[in-house]
Amino acid sequence: MKNYRWGILGIGKIAEKFAADLALLPQARLTAAASRSEDRAADFARRHDAPLHFGSYEALAACPDVDIIYIATPHVAHCEAAMMCLEQGKAVLAKSHWP
């Protein structure tokens, strides 16, 4: 079985819930978290036992140690974030109302 290395882009309330649920899956590992604030990303990563954190979304998208990125920003930013991640070859999980 393949183990999937997840990143979370945006670290608000929904990201907290997603990280907690992700920890229940045997084939999933939260590997990285990204926020516009390096300090907030570091705190989130520490609390959820993720070895990597980034102070920019672009750094997470470019990280070779992440397979899948969950977009946890406000909906209005989902499309741009998802496209950036897809362009870096990442699989993306996002819920949005794209045009």
Image: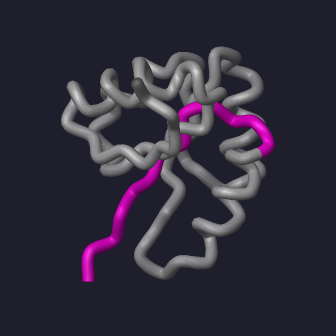
Q: How far across and how far down the image is residue 35, in percent?
A: 63, 24
Q: Can residue 59 be seen from the camera position used here?
A: no
Magenta highlight on residue 2: yes
Question: Which residue is pictured at 54% across the width and 34% down the height?
Answer: 9
Question: Which residue is pictured at 33% across the width and 22% down the height?
Answer: 84
- Indicate the quadrant where residue 36 lies: top right
Q: How far across and how far down the image is residue 76, in percent?
A: 58, 20
Q: Can residue 12 be seen from the camera position used here?
A: yes
Magenta highlight on residue 77: no
Q: How far across and how far down the image is residue 3, in percent?
A: 34, 71
Quarter holding the C terminus is top left
On screen, 71 above or below 19? above
Question: Which residue is pictured at 49% across the width and 63% down the height?
Answer: 29
Asked whether, in this view, residue 93 is left or right of residue 67, the answer is right
On screen, 65 above or below 60? below
- Viewer-side residue, 99 vs 37: 99
Q: How far across and how far down the image is residue 11, in percent?
A: 69, 36
Asked whether, in this view, residue 32 is left or right of residue 44, the answer is left
- Indicate the quadrant where residue 75 lies: top right
Question: Which residue is pictured at 65% across the width and 27% down the height?
Answer: 74
On screen, 60 above or below 93? above
On screen, 21 above or below 86? below
Quarter holding the N terminus is bottom left
Colour mode of the rendering = one colour
Q: Give the range drawn in magenta.
A: 1-13
Total marks in image: 0
- Viewer-side residue, 96 vs 91: 96
